[in-house]
Amino acid sequence: MSVKPLRIWLEYVGFRCVTSMLQMLSARQTARIADTLGWLFVNVLPKKLTRYQIAYDNISRAFASPVKDTTLEDRDVIGPQSQISNLKSESERSLHPQPATLNPDDIHEMIRRMWVHLFRLIAETVQLPRVMTLTNCREIVVFRNRKRVLESYCSGRPVIVLGGHFGNWEVSTATFGLFGLPMGIVGRSIDNPLINDWFVKSRQATGHLLIDKHGAAPEMVALMEAGGNLGLLCDQDAGGKGMFVDFFGQPASTFKSIALMALQYNAILLVGYGIRLPDDFINSRWSRFELGCEEVIDPLTIDADDPIREITQRFTSALERAVRRAPEQYFWVHRRWKSEPRSVTRKRRLQQQASAELKKAS
C-alpha cells in the first residue's frame, strides 16, 4: 500500500471516530463543547492559525457602513404552535441589526460567537441525518415567506436558490429535499475521496444532486435546460474579472454568471438563509432554525440599463440584509473582499510610488 492511500484511510478513520462521538452528543452537550472551543480559538490558539486578523478586518470593514433597516414585520412564520407563541420575542432579542460601528471588544466577541456557531454547524451536519426527518422537521424548522418560495417552485420555470456562508446551510438544503424540492447543489469536493463520499451520500439522501464546482458548467446548463433547480453560494470572491457590487457598503467581486443564467433561462432567483434560533433545551430536543426567503428576483420584471448588474446587486444586497439579522453566524474568515476594483489597485500603486519617492528625497 502506497503512502497516499494509507493517509487517506487514516484520515477517514479519524473522521469517522469524530463523527461517531458527535452523533452521541445531545444538543446541550454540543452547545457547551462548541462554546469551549470558541473560547479556545480566540483566546488561546495563535491568532494567525485561526485567521483572527482576517475576521477582525472583515467585521470592521462591514460595520463601518450605515446599517440598513431590517424589520421583522414581514415574518410569515409557519411552525408548531408551541414555538410560534414565543418565536417573535426570541428573534427580536437575538436576530437584530448591529450598530454601524463596533468597538474592539464587540468585534472580539463576534469572532468568538462565529467560531461557536461554526463548531455547532459541523456537529449539526453530522447529527442531521438521524435527527431530522419529514415527520419531525417542523419541530426543528420554522419558515419565513414560505408562500413566495412555493409560488416560485410552482411557476413551471427553473429556480436558482442562492445562499451564502451564513447560518446552517446544511439544514436549509436538507429541508428542501425532505419536502420534495430537489436541487443540483454546486460545491467544492473534499480532497479526501472517502470523506467526500460520506458527505455526498448524506446530502443526496434527501434527493439532491451534488455537482462539483470544478467543471460544473455543463451539468448546470443541462439542469437549467431541463427546467431543473440549482442551489448556489453567491458570496464567493470572483477575482479581478468579477462584477464589483456593494456588499456591506464595500465593492465585492461577484460572479455575474448567476445573473446570466437567470436571464438566459428565465430562472427565478430565491435568496434564502437558515438562521439558528435561540436555544430552548427545555422544550426542544435539538437546535431550532428559521428558514427564510429574503428576496425573490424575477428576471422578467427587471427594467434596467444593465440587467446583469441590477440582478447581481439585488441578490448581494439581499444576502447582506439576511446576514445583518445574525452577523455572528456569518463566516467572517472567508475573504469576501480579497479582490479589488482596478481603480482602487491603481490608486494604491500610485500612493506607494509617491511614498517611495518621498523616502528617497528625504
Image (tube, helix red, strand yellow):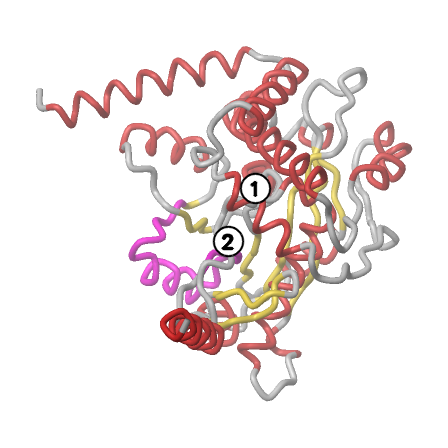
Left or right of 7? Residue 76 is right
Q: Does the magenta stretch include residue 151?
A: no
Q: What stretch is highlighted in magenta?
A: 210-237
Please state which amino acid type lies under the numbered disc 2: Leu
Q: Which of marks 2 and 1 is nearer the N terminus?
A: 1
Left or right of 233? Residue 141 is right
Decide which of 350, 185 is in the foreground and name it: 350
Which residue is label 2 attached to? 233
Please name the residue shown 56% across and 45% down the image. 332
Q: Is residue 270 above or below residue 14?
A: below
Please name the residue shown 59% across and 16% down the image. 33
Is the Cβ of the residue at disc 2 closer than 8 Å to that at disc 1? yes
State which quadrant residue 276 falls in.
top right
Please name the residue shown 43% across and 37% down the image. 204
State which quadrant residue 55 falls in.
top right
Outermost residue, left side: 1
